[in-house]
Image (tube, grey):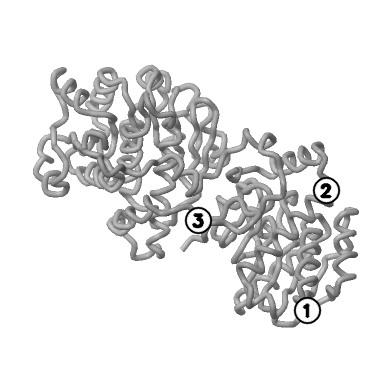
Amino acid sequence: MGARVASASEAVACERAAMKRGATSRELMQRAGVGAADLIISNFPEAVRLGALFFTGKGNNGGDGWVVADSLARRGIPCRVVSMGLPASPEASAARHDALGNGVAQVDACSDDAPVVIDALLGTGSSGFPRGDVASSVDQINLRREGGATVISLDLPSGLDATSGEHEKAVSADLTISFGTVKRGHLVARDLCGTIAVNDIGLDEADMRTLPLLVDRAWVNARVPRISASAHKGTRKSLSIVGGARGMAGAALLSGEGALRSGIGLLRIVTAEGNETAVHAGLPAAIVARWPERADEIAAIVAASDALAIGPGLGSSPRTRDLVERLLLAWNGPAVIDADALNVFAGDVLSLSQLLRGRPAVVTPHPAEMARLIGAQVTDVLERRFEVGLELAAELGACVLLKGTPTVIFAPSGERYVCAAGTAALATGGSGDVLTGMIGTLMAQLCTKDSACSAAEAAACAVFVHGRAAQLCGVVRGTTLADILAAMPEAWNETAETLPSGVIAQLGSFA
């Protein structure tokens, strides 16, 4: 199964459900700790052989740390533990007892230079910022990392809120090993977590099916087929991109580039009068048309399209909404509504719903656009980023793709997908335009009567590849959209990575 994304309370509920099904708290702790030890050895085999230093708290996260120490010690690895006090639960106390019996040393303070440091201070259930000795230990861990030690956090970096991602004083980790689920806070504060590995501790999929699914490479590859050797431009489908007001042809061009890099067979750019020469020069592979004025011009666009993408660089003139409405009334096939095509419906979700319902459709707001659309504050959108699109998607009868860190995709049927691929290289003007062309391509190719792929799944696949292309560039400063577009062939055609045993997802760190 793929990894699910949970708040702190949801993660606790999943573990309680597993215990109702027969697992004990001790068994879950053992699975978490032994699996984490396996991951540490597989990722840092040479360093950990020289020794590991643990910082453990009083709760069950500390118990997880004691299990890891016990498991490593049984394999001949010297382990020392700085503990914040005696464990508070029976299972954590038993884990400490076993570890001490197998040669793990507990110390009051430690000045050694162990190359691997394990953070097991605070777990998913903790709240508030670290205080007292725990806060001092967080500082010590970060100082050791600055000195060259590898830092591994169990479940999440201590000091990071598992639900909101908020933090004031927190561990900065090279690897975070999460247990059972990805925590929301991991994806909001990726810079603290380093590489994130999700260890399967035996939670039941039935208990997690309402949680958002984390999109990964295997999931994408299962939905985006290879283009067959016998394909022609007709089977690769046709996309019309409507946008590019005077002075904003670049947005439509970038969207077209995204479509071409995603495998569209025939691309049409429908742009404002006066932009034709720029579009022809910028995208010789595209057919160019002017914004339609008459019904027959709209009919010609509709007849030649398998999907429409409306909005990149469309502008916010009084003409914008009229153009969007006339196109959507004439076309009942797959559609992507982006940028200004969405902004003209701010506070008028009902009208947009009447235009979109009954077709595969995706709207792609960033948080400020989402706030304008539903009449909310941006802060409220960000605080509720994992839920805020559910009602809107149901009302529109369309997929809502809320951009951000992470991006959350809401299907009208209630499914949610989360995509954490990407880097800050995507935080630049035009990035969303590229994504619109990618989504439009997949909707033209996959959201057909013969395909079971939903608009939300097509959008989630495009978001993942968009982010993955940025990751493949390796760095943020100095990377442009041209670099990201150039990385797309590799991003589209990667094979699924083989994960270590017991790991259900792994996310690379941000560059």
Residue 193, numbered label: none
Q: Dot 1 corresponds to which residue?
A: 110
Q: Position of residue 68 (x, y in %)?
A: 76, 64
* Pointer 2 or 3: first along the chain: 2
- First in sequence, mark 1 or 2: give its number: 2
**Marks 1/2: CA–CA distance:** 30 Å
- Residue type, mark 2 in image: Ser
As shown in the figure, which amino acid type bears the numbered disc 1? Cys
Quickly name the residue at label 2. Answer: 25
**308 lies above or below 56:** above
Q: Residue 471: give x, y in percent of width and height.
A: 42, 58
Q: Please name the amino acid that badge 3 sits on.
A: Glu
Mark 2: give few (<14), some (14-19) or many (20+) Cα within 10 Å: some
Relative placement, left or right, of 203 versus 350 is right
* Mark found first going from the N terminus, 3 or 1: 1
Residue at 89% in and 59% down: 93
Location of mark 3 (residue): 497
Determine the residue positioned at 87% across, 64% down: 96
Q: Which image quarter: residue 385?
A: top right
